Amino acid sequence: MSLLSRYVGRIVLTSMSMVLVLLLGLDVVFSFLGELEDLKADYQAPQALIFTVLSLPFRLCDMMPIAALIGGIVGLGLLANNAELTVMRAAGISIWRLVWWVIKPAMALVALSLLFAEYVVPISQQMADSGKAKALGVHYKVGELSSYWQRQGNTFIKMQSVTPDGVLHGISFYQFDDHGQLQQTQFASEGNYQAQSSWLLSQVNRSQWVADGSTQGSQYPSVIWQSELTPNFLKLVTISPEYLPPTRLFRYASYLEHQGLSSRAYFLEFWKKALAPITTLSMVLVACSFVFGPLRSVTMGLRIIFGILAGLGFRYLQDFSGYASLVYHFSPLLAAGLPIALSLFGGIVALHRVR
C-alpha cells in the first residue's frame, strides 16, 4: 500500500510542480511586459527583467493554492484516464484514502511556500523595489522612513526621518489629556535605541501648558524615552504587509493594536499566510471532488477549465472579503477564513456524495 501511495503522490506532486512552473512562467512574461511601460532613465529592459525575477518568490507563494488545485486535477485526471483510479477503487481503496495520498505532496509544496514567505520574500522584494527605485532615479534606501507617525497612549509622535540603521531624526511629541487638550510638546533632534525598550533622545526642547494657559519651556541635553517601538518594528513599516514574514506580521499587528492604531491590514495578511496550509487543503479537496464527482466522465480539458474558474472564484471571494473587512471593520480572521470554509464545505459535501 505504501508503494501505491508513493506512486500516486509522485504523479500528483509532479503535476502540481509543472502547473506551478507554467503559471510562474506566464506571470513572468506578462509582468515583464507590464514593467516595460515604466522604462525611463536607467530603468531599461534588463533592469525590468531583474525586478520581475526578484519578485518571483512572492508570486510563487501567491500562486501555490491555484497550482495545487489545477495540479491536483491534472494528476488525478491522468490516473483516471488510464483507469488506474478505477482499479484502486475496485481493490477496496476508499475515496478518503486517495484524497489523503493527494494531500501529502500538496503539503510539501505548502511547506516550501511557507519557508519562502518567512525567509526569502521580504529580502527579494526589498531588493527588487530598491533596485527599481534606484534605476528610476528615485531616492530610496531599504529600511528608510520619512514623515512617519506613531501613537503611544495619549501621545502622538512624528519622526521626520528614520535611517536604515534605526536612528531617529526630528522627533516631535504631542501629548494630550483624556479630553483631547494639548498638554505638552517636545522636540528632539535625534533618537538612538538603547537596551530594554528605551531610546536616548538628544537636544530636547519641551513646552508644558500650565493652568493659566501659559507655557513653560525647558531644554535638556538628553532624555530617556521608554517605548515598545524598536528599530526592527520600524523596518517593518517600510515593507508592504503582503511581503512581510508571518511571524513579524503578527508581532507588528499586535503592537499596532496595543497602541490603538489600525492593524486590520496586517492581521488580514497574517491570517491569509497562517491559513495557507488549510487553503491548499481546501483546493485539493475541490480538485478531488472534480475528478471523483460530477466531472469524472468529462475530458481533462473541461476539468481544467472548471478548475481555473473555481480558482478564480476563490481568489475573487478572498479579495472581496478582505476589502470588506477593512471597510466594514469585521474580523480579519473571518475575512480570511470564510472563502476557505466555503471551499472546504463544498469539497467535503461533493466527495461524500461520491458512490
Image (spheres, helix red, strand yellow):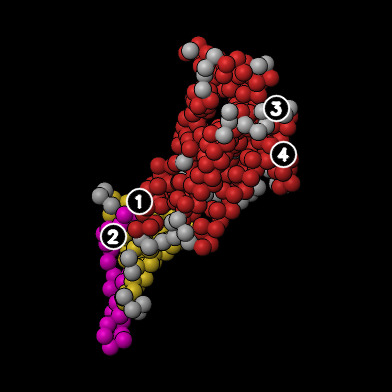
The residue pinned by badge 1 equals: 230
User: What amino acid is found at the position of numbered circle 3 in the picture?
Assistant: Ser
Q: In this picture, which residue range is highlighted in magenta? A: 205-229
Dot 3: element:
loop
Q: Position of residue 215 (x, y in %)?
A: 31, 81
Image mark for residue 204: none
The residue pinned by badge 3 equals: 297
> Residue 46 magenta-drawn?
no
Compared across the picture, whether 24 is left or right of 216 comes to right
Sequence-first disc among 4 and 2: 4
Sequence-first disc among 4 and 1: 4
The residue pinned by badge 4 equals: 30
Compared across the picture, whether 204 is left or right of 161 comes to left
Q: Residues within 10 Å of mark 1 (few under 14, many from 20)?
A: some
User: What amino acid is found at the position of numbered circle 2 in the picture?
Assistant: Trp
Q: Residues within 10 Å of mark 2 (few under 14, many from 20)?
A: some
